């Protein structure tokens, strides 16, 4: 098994890319003509901390049967068997001591790669489908998690919300003036965001929210303000108020990503445009790469691959969302 972290100069890599025709190209006629198929990718949940080795081995065995069936149906044995053997070898060598949540395995006659990822994914098997690295990113589950801060002049509550539950994590009554109280709530929100860096909804009377917006240092994390007094409301009512936002979670997620880029930019931790991002993506300084969906090209796929291999995360946004950033932006750790 080889866990690959790609490094080197931009021109040097592209030359190597053309020579090897790795599985991430989508120029199928060229690949087929040069004999570098079949190419297989397996992306699936792999969380040994939460799932027994026996169950994981069963899921992997089932996935291998699907891969074998597709390969043997589409290719002669002499071309299918070597790739199947690579897949089996990599699967047998998987690390069951990892604390990651998923695995991505890629194999072709010329390459074999394994990534352990700290994101949730849907199982996906692809044989000569498209860009494997994009398949991997699209396979990530979009987990809906958010914070709700409810404010009034008398008290406040903070909840951690997801698709199935609301968990109260903070409740306060005011001390001192309203501005001091709201400042205290904002400081508490800052602390909570360190543990739960999720989009924030703030609910409260219009006058209270007006004051809060003037003093908050967490504006870049807030994706919505909702007017009304909901401190004594039932969970179902709160979810009802938030439903328009939650039903369009992709827009909420995109707003949150753009806000994160802006906040990181204020700390000089953002690279933008493919040239800057390429230089900054090597090693383990890449925290989060954000790319417009329609921004294609070998160099873009390579950067995504480098970020994932270094332990970073990659997310897509709609075309035009990163116009000010050259269609691609990288948040660095430092």
Image (tube, rainbow, N blue to C red):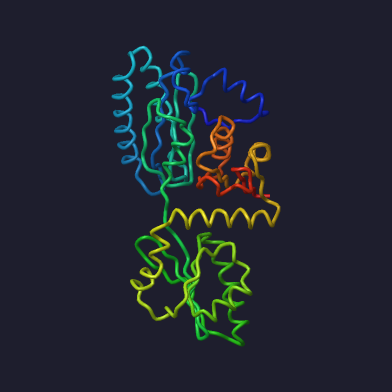
Q: Residue at x 49, y 36 (%)?
A: 115
Question: Horizontal placement of 209 versus 266: left or right?
Answer: left
Q: Is residue 159 above or below residue 318?
A: below
**Between 59 and 77, which is closer to the camera in this rendering?**
77
Number of callouts in the render? Answer: 0
Q: Where's residue 87, x and y in %? A: 40, 26
Q: Where's residue 205, x and y in %? A: 49, 80
Residue 106 occupies quadrant: top left
Q: Residue at x 36, y 17 (%)?
A: 81
Q: Where's residue 324, x and y in %? A: 63, 48
Question: Horizontal placement of 185 versus 203: left or right?
Answer: right
Q: Where's residue 224, x and y in %? A: 50, 66
Question: Horizontal placement of 263 versus 169: left or right?
Answer: right
| Direction right: furthest residue | 268
Question: Horizontal placement of 43 versus 15: left or right?
Answer: left
Q: Is residue 252 above or below residue 279?
A: below
Q: Residue at x 59, y 43 (%)?
A: 327
Q: Residue at x 36, y 60 (%)?
A: 163
**Between 304 and 188, which is closer to the camera in this rendering?**
304
**Between 193 and 37, which is closer to the camera in this rendering?**
37
Q: Is residue 87 above or below residue 186?
A: above
């Amino acid at each position: 098994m080889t866990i690959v972290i790609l490094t080197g100069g931009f021109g040097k890599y592209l030359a190597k890319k053309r020579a090897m025709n790795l599985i991430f190209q989508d120029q199928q006629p060229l690949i087929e003509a040069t004999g570098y198929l079949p190419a297989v990718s397996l992306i699936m949940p792999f969380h040994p901390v939460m799932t027994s080795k026996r169950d994981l081995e069963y899921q992997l065995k089932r996935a291998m049967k699907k891969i074998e069936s597709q390969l043997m149906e589409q290719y002669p044995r002499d071309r299918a068997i070597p790739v199947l053997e690579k897949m089996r070898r990599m699967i047998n060598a998987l690390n069951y001591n990892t604390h990651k949540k998923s695995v991505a395995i890629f194999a072709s006659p010329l390459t074999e790669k394994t990534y352990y990822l700290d994101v949730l994914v849907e199982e996906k098997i692809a044989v000569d489908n498209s860009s494997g690295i994009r398949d991997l990113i699209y396979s990530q589950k979009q987990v809906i998690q958010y914070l709700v801060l409810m404010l009034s002049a008398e008290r406040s509550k903070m909840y951690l919300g997801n698709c199935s539950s609301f968990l109260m994590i903070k409740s306060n009554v005011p001390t001192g003036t309203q501005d001091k109280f709201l400042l205290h709530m904002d400081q508490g929100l800052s602390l909570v965001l360190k543990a739960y860096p999720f989009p924030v909804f703030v609910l409260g009377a219009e006058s209270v929210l007006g004051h809060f917006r003037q003093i908050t240092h967490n504006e870049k994390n807030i994706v919505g303000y909702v007017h009304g007094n909901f401190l004594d409301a039932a969970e179902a009512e709160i979810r009802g108020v938030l439903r328009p936002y939650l039903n369009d979670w992709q827009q909420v997620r995109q707003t949150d990503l753009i806000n994160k880029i802006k906040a990181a930019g204020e700390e000089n931790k953002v690279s933008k445009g493919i040239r800057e991002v390429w230089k900054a993506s090597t090693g383990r300084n890449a925290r989060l790469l954000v790319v417009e969906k329609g921004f294609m090209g070998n160099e873009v796929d390579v950067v995504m691959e480098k970020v994932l291999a270094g332990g970073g995360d990659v997310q897509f946004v709609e075309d035009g969302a990163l116009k000010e950033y050259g269609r691609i932006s990288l948040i660095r750790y430092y």
